[in-house]
Image (cartoon, grey):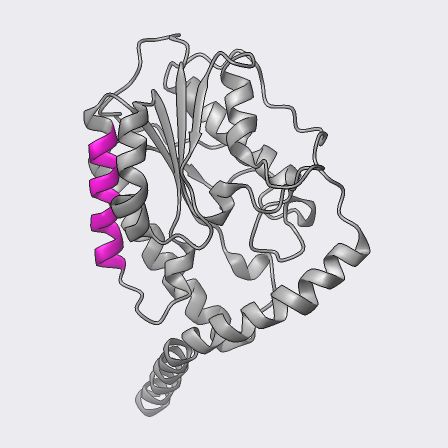
Amino acid sequence: MIVEKLPAVSVLPVGRRVASLAILGDSTAVGLGDPLPAGGWRGFGPLLMAALGTPGEVRYRNLSVLGARMADLRRRQLPGALAAQPDVAVIVAGMNDTLRSDFDPVAMRQDLDVTVAALQATGTVVLTIRYHDHGQVFWLPGPLRRALCHRVEQLNGAIDQVVAQRGALCLDLHVMPGAYDSAAWSVDRLHPSELGHRFLACGFAELLTGAGIAVPYPVDLVCGGGRQLTTADHIGWLVFRGTPWLVRRGRDLIPHAAAVVAQDLFGRLRQQRVS
């Protein structure tokens, strides 16, 4: 796994065991895509917690919320995270913003920067992610795909700025081994499957190890403990959630997609005139 080493603002002493872990973010941070047999979601958080210590050894708090946007982390999740005083905090958010008509990468950068800085000020080691090319994971019409790609590039740019300024640890999904394997994604192709969440937990664990933090129990990439999804589960999601979601989010992206198409068209016309 490729990990870019950055000068962390706050790093635990070499080999120190983590006593507390906090998760902030959206549905991926909640654990969507990795259902438990008794209901609810697991996700990368508990898997990472298990890598950091034995049961009961690491305090764990997951403040993430389905549908959360970057501003929600700063306004609603950060106070709880600060109260928990975690040694390590993982932030996964931003994709919900890219799918909305009021997308604002400058405001997102500011919200992320405030969140990261506030956590680091208490001695917390902060990890976050930069996103992959979603067009390699699920199909969208050409204009919508280009519009989403453009926004993800802007989101990653905002994340890169905060990571560089604050020295946070960052997992790049585009180069993470397994990121584009179909088995790493749930039926919606937006949320990781159990295997995908294990990939995330493994990536975060390697970042922590590289920062000199003890990770005594390697993340197991062999799936187990989750609920196996059936064909009926997949069909039910596509009918009752997947298609309605695509219609709603596509409607939000259409104006931006139209602008991308217009830019492409005008660019081609200019090239034709020059030639």
Question: Residue 265, how many percent across, how many down?
Answer: 39, 86
Q: Residue furthest bottom?
A: 273
For the C terminus, give its image quadrant.
Answer: bottom left
Question: Residue 79, how many percent across, how many down?
Answer: 26, 36
**Viewed as shown, does residue 228 lie left or right of 88?**
right
How many marks are shown on the rendered structure?
0
Q: Is residue 114 magenta?
A: yes
Q: Residue at x 75, y 55 (%)?
A: 233
Asked where in the image residue 263 lies, by quadrant, the reply is bottom left
Can residue 265 be seen in this snapshot? Answer: yes
Comparing 14 with 120, the one in front is 120
**Viewed as shown, does residue 75 lie left or right of 171?**
left
What is the chief secondary structure element of the magenta stretch? helix
Comparing 216 with 167, the one in front is 216
What range of the chain is rendered magenta? Answer: 105-119
**Viewed as shown, does residue 47 lie left or right of 101?**
right
Question: Residue 235, how many percent across, how many down?
Answer: 75, 63
Q: Is residue 13 magenta?
A: no
Q: Residue at x 58, y 18 (%)?
A: 218
Determine whether 273 is above or below 150 in the image. below
Can residue 168 be seen in this snapshot? Answer: no
Q: Residue at x 52, y 25 (%)?
A: 48
Question: Residue 256, how many percent across, how many down?
Answer: 37, 76
Q: Residue furthest front?
A: 38
Comparing 142 with 220, the one in front is 220
Q: Residue at x 29, y 29 (%)?
A: 6
